[in-house]
Structures are given as C-alpha cells and as structure tokens.
Image: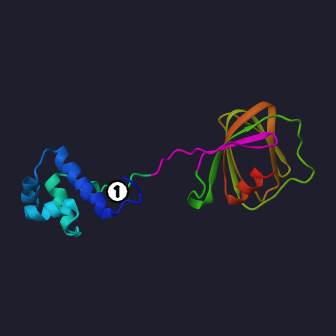
Amino acid sequence: MTANEAVDTRVRRRLRELRTEQGLTLAQVAERAHIDVSTLSRLESGKRRLALDHLPALASALGVSADELLGAVPPADPRVRSQPQKMGPMTMWPLTHRGSPGGLQAYRIVVVPDGRVPPDELPVHEGHDWFYVLSGKLRLVLGEKDFIIEAGEAVEFSTWTPHWFGAVDGPVELIGIFGPQGQKLHLHE
C-alpha cells in the first residue's frame, strides 16, 4: 500500500484481501452486505465504481471498521534520523523532525569543556530555552547570576535574558528544547 495509491484501488484490494483471509466467498459477503453478487464482483474487479454508501455495509459484512476497509495509509516512519551537528564544543543530535508543532525542536546535546569563558557581552535573542542535564555539570550564566546545573536538574529561561552555557569539569550531556529563534542561534554560534 502506498500513499499514492488511489482510495478506490486501495478499497478494492482490501475488500479482496479481507474476504479471502476470512475464507469467504463473493456470495457470502454479498449476502451479508445486502448487495447483489455481480455488484460485489464488479466492485472488487474495478468494473464498477465504489460508492461511499457501499462502505458501511461491506465493512460490516467483513466484521471490520470502515477505516480498516479503507486501508488507510500507514503513518510515516516516526523515527528521527538526522545527522549530528557540531558547533565548537557542542554536538547536537536532533530528536524532533523539522516543522514540529509550535516550531519547537528538541536535541540531545553533548558539550565538552574547551576552556571557553563567557563573553563580556552575553548573547540575547528572541525565544525560550529549556535544558535537562543527563550527566555532568553545566555552567549557566544568566544575566548577573552564575549557576551550576547538575544531572537530574532542569532549567527554563527566556532568551531575552543575556545568557551563556558551557561544560564544567568534563563533558555534559543534556536534552535541550529550543524555539525557532534559539535553534538558529545555537546551531550557528
């Protein structure tokens, strides 16, 4: 079954599949659906166009829902398979597909210590950031305050507040969620 397969083609194929899986004859399904055997035969073979009013009776005759008879296209593969992106001391693995609802993007992030210190002027941008530290220690400078965020702790802050973060005493692994503006900034620092 493909996304491009026409609905009527899909229904005809599913009708035949379900009928044969259940070991039913055309006559048995036609009787249960209260339609003529020749009509059912022509529906299955594509010689007669399927009408919407056929669906409930045929689904009931086969003991399935109309959705099962329609053979809806299966959902796309939900796995996120993007390549990691490296930016200086940070490597980010996308955990969400592009175009996620609300424009939010989640990343698994590993930050290695590189001797960097916060710049004299901390960056500010539109948006909101959220981090959850999985392992290690994260230094977060937020305005005039300096925090050490340890494994198991989460932080959330407006990115209108001047901010900077880096690893302390070894690599830090975290989950980060960024809005569209924060994503652009963090991926291109």
Report the side of 1 relative to 134 (left or right): left
The quadrant where residue 138 appears: top right
Residue 182 colored in magenta in the image = no
Colour mode? rainbow
Residue numbers of the magenta segment: 76-96
Report the side of 165 relative to 28 (left or right): right
Q: Is residue 110 visible?
A: yes
Q: Position of residue 2 (x, y in %)?
A: 40, 54
Neighbor class of circle 1 (other Cα within 10 Å; few <14, some 14-19, many 20+) is some
Q: Looking at the image, which is closer to me, 144 or 31?
A: 31
Q: Position of residue 157 (x, y in %)?
A: 72, 53
Report the side of 122 relative to 91 (left or right): right
Q: Is residue 119 above or below residue 161?
A: above
Residue displayed at 86% across by 50% down: 144
Main secondary-structure element of the magenta-colored stretch: loop
Residue 84 colored in magenta in the image = yes
Q: Amino acid at mark 1?
A: Ala
Q: Is residue 136 above or below residue 96?
A: above
List the single residue furthest toward the top: 169
The quadrant where residue 173 appears: top right
Q: Position of residue 112 (x, y in %)?
A: 79, 35
Q: Which residue is mark 1?
A: 72
List the single residue furthest toward the right: 120
Q: Looking at the image, which is closer to me, 147 or 183?
A: 183
Q: Is residue 147 visible?
A: no
- Secondary structure of the residue carrying tag 1 is loop
Residue displayed at 10% across by 63% down: 38
Report the side of 171 relative to 42 (left or right): right
The quadrant where residue 4 appears: bottom left
Q: Position of residue 104 (x, y in %)?
A: 62, 56
